[in-house]
Amino acid sequence: MGLQAAFDLLLASESALDGLDALIWQSLAAAATSAKHPWTNGCLTTISTIDGERPCPSSRTVVLRRCDVAARTIDCHTDVRSSKVNELESRGGAVCWLFYHPSTKIQLRLQGSARVVNDKQADAEWETVSLLSRSAYLSVETPGKAVSNPLPPSTEDRFVEQAESERGRENFRLIRTQVETVDWLYLRQGGHVRASLEYGGKGSVQESWLVP
Ligand SMILES: Cc1cc2nc3c(=O)[nH]c(=O)nc-3n(C[C@H](O)[C@H](O)[C@H](O)COP(=O)(O)O)c2cc1C
């Protein structure tokens, strides 16, 4: 069943609010394992600064790579030298994820606290990174650094053999977000609906409908 159909079915039940948390996490878990799922790509926002002072949100597309339903965490991959790592670490981990795909009319906003992970799980994830994708972790210079070359630097210059690609492991990390709040909005044809979920200690969840 597609994402939208699953939420339609839930909304047809009398206890839709009770089932919302489970369906959202079931969908995130599906997105983390299928490149075709509408929530495969998310937008991750950290808090950056302009002129080194003024706080300013900074968003970028990332791929949802892992989802731990029981722990309510979601992961993406990153180069440890990227701006997002510095931004989340200097802001106590504050992040916001946004998932939206036009085919579904469902927007999911997740706020929480993120940390950088470099453990055995990261080792295992690195093994799943394709040779082509490993080129993203092989820059000598810091990602995002301005260059004065006449031509744009490209990862194409870093397409290497498997053995050499292992060098990228030192730059590879997971960003793990502990989700604390969810804002779910569905622009349903029969009328828009919106709900919020708040996670407390010991797995508690507080659900409420919101005025859309
Ligand atoms: C479709 C798509 C998927 C992407 N996935 C990731 C990802 O999973 N992790 C990542 O660090 N950057 C990913 N990027 C690149 C980021 O959007 C961003 O440009 C890069 O991480 C640098 O961001 P930063 O300088 O704000 O840290 C992706 C970009 C696109 C267009």
Image (cartoon, helix red, strand yellow):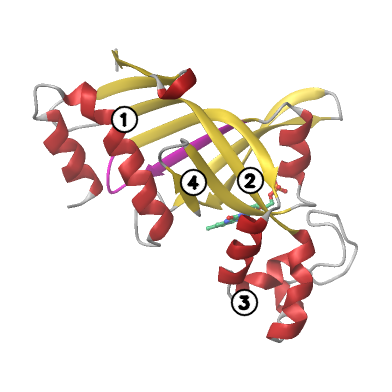
The amino acid type, in three-letter code, at marker 1 is: Asp
> SS at mark 2?
strand
Q: Position of residue 179 (x, y in %)?
A: 50, 31
Q: Is residue 184 above or below residue 149?
A: above
- Is label 2 within 8 A of ligand 1 (CB to nearest ligand atom)? yes
The mark that comes first in sequence, 3 or 1, is 1
How far apart in space, not on screen, are marks 1 and 4 (Cα)?
18 Å
What secondary structure is marked by label 1? Answer: helix
The residue that mark 1 highlights is 21
**N-terminal-most mark, 4 or 3:** 4
Q: Is residue 144 left or right of residue 14?
A: right
Spatial CA distance of label 2 from label 1 is: 22 Å
Quadrant of the image occupied by residue 37: bottom left
Q: Which mark is residue 175?
A: 2
Q: Residue at x 84, y 57 (%)?
A: 142
Ligand 1's quadrant:
bottom right
Q: Which residues are magenta?
A: 95-105
